[in-house]
Amino acid sequence: MDLIQKNLLAQIADLHEVPEGAYNIRANGESAGSNTTANIDIVKKDDKDGIDIIIKPGTKNESVHIPVLLSQSGIQEMVYNDFYIGEGANVTIVAGCGIHNGGANDSKHDGIHTFYIGKNAKVKYIERHYGSGDGNGERIMNPETVIHLEEGAVLEMETTQIKGIDSTNRITRGDLAAGAVLEVKEKLMTHGKQYARTDFSVDLNGDGCSANIISRSVAKDESRQEFFSNINGNCVCSGHSECDAIIMDKAVVAASPQLTAANIDASLIHEAAIGKIAGEQLIKLMTLGLTEEEAEEQIINGFLK
């Protein structure tokens, strides 16, 4: 990998060298390295771009890294990755995409990640998006995540996009069996004329399952954000959706949470708050010697932490 690709890898996966354990690094549409372990297999698909990640039942304390890097202007790709996590496994999966566009053509990465998480398995899934480059071509990402949680399964999902992506449409779909748990934490920041759309839809189908979706975002300049969430409670379950946004300059933020209860014992809550940085917060930090710009940065960093 060249220096640009190494920087992208560091930004989206905190990797400064080849990781230990299982990994598959995709760069400019091709494999840049792959490794399997005794418990984790990575198989290239025959019929389309993408891989199958197969994790044996009972696998504990192992990780998988599957970053995607685009450093050539004009590359546009669609990738399909399927994850099969065996019963009782406990693993961490680190994904994400970094795009460096220094040219005039748009660069785009679309991907569908489908998770089949077995009974009583637990997965922590970390996905980061990052863009760089001073070309006129846009940096576009459209990730879709499809989640199937079997009985007692747990998925903790952390998604972060705080720099450099001109347009993104993030779609997440999920269905939960009895006792399953879905925890989603999204962090998002847009600036310039960037556009970001988030669309969650979760079906709570098994008694005792729960979903907790939290989105925190900052919209600057003339950027636009749209947040949609739909939680369907079809059983004795609990669901919570929260969108909390800071709006600055001439930005636009729209939030549309929706709840549907189809069971008398479904407990569903949604919250949405959009507002500017409070003046007293700025004043307090500026009395400590910070400039207004430095104070805003401190507040935003704390908000997105």
Image (tube, rainbow, N blue to C red):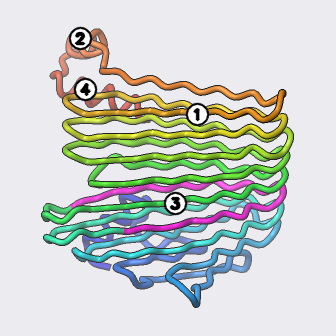
Give the Cα distance between marks 2 and 1.
37 Å
Q: Earlier in the sequence, mark 3 or mark 1?
A: 3
User: How many marks overall?
Assistant: 4
Mark toward the start of the polypeptide (2 vs 3): 3
Magenta segment boundaries in residue numbering: 109-132
Task: Give residue 48's position: percent from left, percent from top.
Answer: 53, 84
Name the amino acid type tagged 1: Gln
Give residue 185's position: percent from left, percent from top.
54, 41
Query: Mark 1 = which residue?
Result: 258
Which of the two marks, 3 or 4, is nearer to us in this view? 3
Residue 37 placement, left or right of 18? right
Q: Is residue 122 magenta?
A: yes
Q: Where is 3 relative to 226, above or below?
A: below
| Helix, strand or loop at mark 4 | helix
Local crowd size for mark 4, using a 10 Å CA cut-off: few (<14), some (14–19), many (≥20): some
Structural distance between the alpha carbons of marks 3 and 4: 32 Å
Task: Tell me the residue at 60%/40% (across/down).
Answer: 230
Which residue has dot 4 on it? Answer: 296
Nearest to the observer: residue 111 or residue 153: 111
Mark found first going from the N terminus, 4 or 1: 1
Question: Residue 27's image quarter?
Answer: bottom left
